Image (spheres, grey):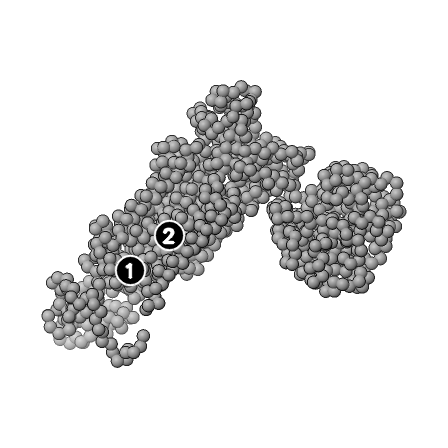
Amino acid sequence: MGKFSRLGNDLYTGKKSVDFVARRYVWYAASGVIILLAVAGLYFKGLNMGIEFVGGAQYKVTLAGSSVGQDQADAVRQAVAGTGVDGASAPVVTTSGSNSVIIQTKSLSTAENQKVVDAILQTLDAKPSQMQQEQIGASWGKDVAKRSLTGLIVFLILVVLFIWAYFREWKMSVAAIVALAHDMIITVGVYALSGFEVSPATVTGLLTILGFSLYDTVVVFDKVRENTKNLRASHRTYREAANLAVNQTLVRSINTSIVALIPVGAILYVGAVQLGSGSMKDLALALFVGMAAGAYSSIFIATPLLAHMKEKEAANKALEKRLATRRRHEADRYAAVPVFTEDMPVRDADDDLDDEDEHAGHEVTATTTPQRPVPTGRGRVVPQAQRPVEESPASRRTQPTRQPRSKRGKK
Amino acid sequence: MARRTARPQRTLAIFFLGILVMYGLVALAGSWKPALGLDLEGGTRIRLTAVGDGVTSENLKEAAGIIDQRVNGSGVSEAEVTTEGNQYVVVEIPGKSRRDLVETVERQAQLRFRVVAQSGVGTATPTAPASPTGSSTAEPTPSVSPGGGVLLPSDSPSATKTPKTKPSSSASGSTGNNRPGFLLDGKKTKSADPSGTASPTDGASPSSSPTDGATATPTDGATDGAGGTPDINDPLTWMDNPDAKSVAAYNAFSCDNGANTISKNVDPETGKTTEGDNPKLPLLACDDQGQKFLLSVSMVEGTDLDNASAGIPQNQLNWVVNLDFNGHGSDEFAKISQALYGTQKLFAIVLDGKVLSAPTMNGIITNGQAEISGNFNQASAQSLALSLRYGSLPIAFDKDVSVETIGPSLAGDQLKWGLIGGAIGLGAVMIYCLFYYRGLGLVVLASLLVAASITYALVLLLDKAANFTLTLPGIAGLIVAIGITADSFIVYFERIRDEMRDGKSMRVAVEAGWKRARNTCLAADAVSLLAAVVLYIFAAGVVRGFAFALGISTVIDLVVFFWFTHPMVSWLARHPFFNRGHKLSGLDAEALGVDRINIAPVTAGGKA
């Protein structure tokens, strides 16, 4: 706790700093490998689309006389899932009316079909004549997907415009979208590689990640903008200012990630340990990975990428050069002092180590006057305190204040 | 200064009052348990059987798509629509008894506008040709009287006050019938007649010159219709002079089954009639009151509608369905209204082969806005508007629909464990916040609890208002929202700490940090809101439900952040426990990671 806070303070003041931006190629490479894996998984294994997207088979068993309860539906679900048939690993089982059960699976081959039928009939103790089979279509037809996709594209365009308008910087839009694509590809890759069934719940999960990723990126960029607002005054290059911003928001990013991931982790735990299978676990895993990727990409992808693009700007390049010269000069202030010879002028007119505009604020003189006054314990210079100043006994009472004449009688 | 210090408490008081009001509304609504979705509680399953030929898997899918939009169009209930076999469409809707939706779902909603050539009592008249509409000799049968359907009796008092009253209403002396009327919205038309009391002849003559001569012709046309060979594809002349074969078919037609009589198409070449509603052929159809109509080919189609909505027009009592035509529909409609305005001729609004109403034209309508009035109540008007809005179904369905209750599709313990997972998550978040932020953690805790209670109340209220139901993914989404909500507080607290590290005192830092954190949170939440709004407008089904939930949780986040967390922290900042940096306040030197806090600024020379 104390150490973490101390780290927070050091990160804030810049005393301690992790150079996220400089090591960008490491992050790019790491993300590239992961994305490559995800794309490979997508390409070779493909996504396991659920019944809602591809349709499938439906079995309806009507039991004469006896009534059907939720227990029987649960039993059938387990039995069908237990057959080991690929397409029937996540059947949808509902009671229908008071005496029938509806089981939906993906399209099955004849042999698989027989297996599933046997399992159902055995569990429900029914005769084959009581069962009806039908092909069912997708409830998430093409046009539903198309409409959602239209919405998504419109949203992305608006987000680009929004970020551009808010930060006045189109490069931030680009960086945010790249980070978003990074998170989405990784999450989809998890689905492809793990073979989880993609259901409408997955779609909502992906959209949650989309929202979270952008949200997180905007929070980090807000700090970047604040730090880079007045680069010349702060004597920092864009890269350093961006890096400081990331470091300053690091504690916040860690806390947010922990707080956001704890609930998802709890669902994941419950889903995996208590429920075994089910859409909940899949959804929680996707969310967990996606949100972690979202937090990661804001720091490791979006900001370095932004700095990368901004550094290439002419103004920032010039600034960087100027600062480099300045720092080199400040490292050894006397390096440029020429050895005295008889006929040497007092100051060389061409001795222009510094940039033109630096002269005004920062006079370079070859004198021995130290930059800071040495505390002598006299005059107006405050000596270093030996220990914290103790509270004056009057500190809790309101003390009379003396104000200059011009301020008196005004509020 | 005094004003300023009073503020946080006042804001907090108003905020809690708001929550109380919300729960008061919930108590009025009367249900304390949220409605659960299909996966958790089951619902109603409606199975529609497609009838007629030409049912292919393509148009079955298309029909399923349109039905999906209809059932999900009015709210976010996350109903599911699938096709089954080659002739069934299955609709699953959360809620145990949703029989009321059957009509909305199965209505084919083929809306067509045709002009009326002949109308009369719905019995077969094999001998004499029926008297055509336009003639005044038809007076003995009040139901055919021209213009009768224009206004309902209850409308007429108010109508005289508005400029949309038209001359023809007084022309029809026999408005005594109570046939479902039709009223065209003349409010925005250029030619709305200002004088509601104008005599029929005065009012009609100036503007109706092109059709003036035609009013006399129907009688002739009907009797010796065989003389000319009218083109059925020119309905405006055909209606005055229908061909003999159609008239013969009309005479033979009868509305035996009242409103349920199946409409018939007439083939003008052969005079044969076939059941159906083909837009390219003249139509024989009946209305509610058992009157029969001979109608022209379709002039405006329901596909030309831009929008349809239900509402009560000003100064009126009855529900109507407002129609809004697109460019092509408006043009056609303007053509019809120009031809018919000022005459006693009728046109008919035909829905799925049934004449909804057959009014005269009240004004020349060029802006494509019209309204259907009739025997609507709120439910039927909204249902019709909903069906019309998403277009007509390419196929017809059997009237006999199977409706049954279905159970949840997820195992019974999923909900329980989902909630337990959420509780564990929430607890862990709270413990972490308490550990890390100490005293301020209490603020996080309180904020999260407040946010949770608002969310719960909203879920209950939206269940009533928009059929919002909680599905398992929805619950997962709300749990995820905990993290995003807590992030606002984290951003804020970190800002406060940063300001204090810069040497500001707690009370100053709270306000300075607020200004910066507020902007950050507004920008970040704007992105979330943007996502919610755009996806809600464009997407359908589950995604729409998700967008809705995202929007709610983002708004709640902002509301709590602005009106609870900030006033709370400002208020706490006035207590010495916090502003003097007590060890447990979370704002002591150790928590900030600095050696000491500047409680008073160091002045040159130290303290006196």
Quarter of the picture containing the N terminus of chain B is bottom left
SS at badge 2? helix
Chain letter of disc 2 in the image: A
Q: How crowded is mark 1: few (under 14 residues within 10 Å), some or many (20 or more)?
A: many
Q: Is residue A107 visible?
A: no
**Which residue carries the number 2 mark?**
A217
Residue type beneath disc 2: Thr
Outermost residue to the bottom:
A405
Q: How crowded is mark 2: few (under 14 residues within 10 Å), some or many (20 or more)?
A: many
**Which residue carries the number 1 mark?**
B573
Q: Which of B111 and A114 is in front in this view?
A: B111
Circles 1, 2 touching at the beta carbon (< 8 Å): no
Would residue A313 appear left or right of B205 to someone viewing this image? left
Chain letter of disc 1 in the image: B
Q: Which residue is drawn at 29% across and 58% down?
A: B572
Q: Is residue A62 above or below residue B321?
A: above
Q: Residue at x 68, y 34 (%)?
A: B52
Q: Can residue A5 be seen in this view?
A: yes
Q: Quadrant of residue A190?
A: top left
Number of numbered callouts drawn: 2
Quarter of the picture containing the C terminus of chain B is bottom left
